[in-house]
Structures are given as C-alpha cells and as structure tokens.
Amino acid sequence: MKNKKYALVIGGTGMLAQVCHALVNDYYYVSVIGRSTIRQQQLKDSSNEPDKFHGIEVDYHDDGRFRQQLQKAFQAFGTPDLVVSWIHGSAPQALDSLIDEITRINKTKTWKLFHVQSSSRFFEKENTPVPENCQYRRVYLGFILNDSTSRWLTHKEISDGVIRAIHADQTESVVGTLEPWDKRP
Ligand SMILES: NC(=O)c1ccc[n+]([C@@H]2O[C@H](COP(=O)([O-])OP(=O)(O)OC[C@H]3O[C@@H](n4cnc5c(N)ncnc54)[C@H](OP(=O)(O)O)[C@@H]3O)[C@@H](O)[C@H]2O)c1
C-alpha cells in the first residue's frame, strides 16, 4: 500500500461513482465515504477491481465518528494523495475536520483536494483555508445551456467534468456553464 496512490472520495457512491472508477483505473486505491452499505456494495460490484475499493460507512454530520473513521483509514492506508470532496451544505464542518485529520498526520507530503461545489457557491467565492502542503482545486457544477433551454447536469456529465478537472489539474473549473446565471433551469 505504501508505494501506491491513495485517494479518498467523499460522496463517491452517488454522482461521483464514475470518478471512483476512473481513479481505480488510474492505479489509485480508493476509500469512499457514504452512509449506505448497499450503495457501497453496488459501487464495488460495478468494478472489475472491487478489491481496490474501501468503503467508509459514516455520516459526515457526526463529527466524532467521522474523524474516528478517517483516523482508522489513514492508519491503515496512510494519508491520501488525492481527495475529491462532495459534501452537502448541511455539514459545513466536515471538510475542515477532514483537512485537520490529514494535517495531524501529514504536515509535509503534498496532497491535492478537489472540492466539488454546487452552482450557487460560485457567486459566494468562499475561502477554504488549507495547509501549505495541500494543493486546493475547486470544481463548480453548472448547467447545460442549449439554444433556448437549459437543464442541470447528468451524473455522467458531472463525473466526466470532475475527471477532466483532475487530469487538467486546474485551480478552478466549471462543469457545464454558470453564465448567464438567469438562464439556469
Ligand atoms: N449543477 C449543480 O449545481 C448540482 C449541484 C448538486 C447536485 N446536482 C444534482 O443533484 C442531484 C442530487 O445530489 P446528491 O448529492 O443528492 O447526489 P449523490 O451524489 O447521488 O448523493 C450524495 C453522495 O454523498 C453521500 N452522502 C450524502 N449524505 C451523506 C452524509 N450525511 N454522510 C456521508 N455521505 C453522504 C451519498 O451516499 P449515502 O447516501 O450512502 O450517504 C452519496 O455518495 C445529483 O444527481 C446532481 O445531478 C446538481
């Protein structure tokens, strides 16, 4: 494990499932955070390499248990080289807790954080404090604008866009478009 790449995907059993598969194809061992055992199993079952997945079944609203589960994973696999985070706005402390738990163990090794955020966050331009050894990347989810109509992104478009962002390694990217904002669905 020590010489392999390790990724953690928060919310990886949902619309980011294809991101998890892409990371496994890219030789990562992937820990996936989500509450449901069934969704974790479905993710593994849809892979040719189920042994490359490690499910962390925890609710990120429960900060104590969330931190405890992260510690367990980091003891087993080391701290992640790459984190993809999709956390609902109802758990504003969860990302800070994750960064804190990584930093307690790893203060020097460079790691990347791809922070996936919904459309409305684009206009808030919030500041996410990260330690010096964390390379922070923000990915906003937008919408698809056709001639006179618009629609929200499909799961495939979201995953494809996040995978592109990881490969391109841009500081900030938008999946679909966010402008003109008044044309959103
Ligand atoms: N364009 C946009 O701005 C935009 C933004 C957001 C969403 N969307 C759309 O909205 C839809 C719904 O989004 P969604 O986030 O509900 O979809 P989702 O990605 O299918 O589900 C959320 C993911 O986070 C996990 N999760 C949720 N709550 C959790 C918790 N409390 N603790 C730990 N893990 C948790 C879920 O697993 P468990 O259920 O197992 O916990 C799942 O892996 C998506 O299909 C997307 O198309 C669009």
Image (spheres, grey):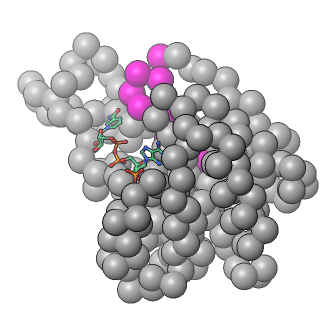
Q: Vertically, is 47 above or below 83? A: below
Kindly tell me whether residue 57 is visible in this rendering: yes
In the picture, residue 3 is in which quadrant? bottom right
Residue at horizontal 77%, vertical 49%? 101
Residue at the limit of the structure toward the right, as seen here: 108
Residue at horizontal 38%, vertical 72%? 41
Kindly tell me whether residue 171 is visible in this rendering: no
Tag count in the figure? 0
Is 178 covered by the magenta stretch? Answer: no
Left or right: where 153 falls relative to 24: left
Left or right: where 32 falls relative to 42: right
Residue at the limit of the structure toward the left, as seen here: 148
Q: Looking at the picture, tell me which residue is in the foreground, 66 or 169.
A: 66
Residue 174 % position (x, y):
43, 37
Left or right: where 165 falls relative to 73: left
Is 116 covered by the magenta stretch? Answer: yes
Residue 180 % position (x, y):
29, 18
Residue 21 % position (x, y):
43, 71
Residue at horizontal 51%, vertical 59%? 57
Left or right: where 118 falls relative to 52: left
Residue at horizontal 46%, vertical 65%? 20
- Give the magenta range: 114-123
Residue 1 % position (x, y):
72, 82
- Quadrant position of the C terminus in the picture: top left
Q: Looking at the picture, tell me which residue is in the foreground, 153 or 100.
A: 100
Q: Looking at the picture, tell me which residue is in the foreground, 138 or 29.
A: 29
Q: Vertically, is 124 above or below 75? A: above
Q: Looking at the picture, tell me which residue is in the foreground, 19 or 98.
A: 98
Q: Quadrant of ligand 1?
A: top left
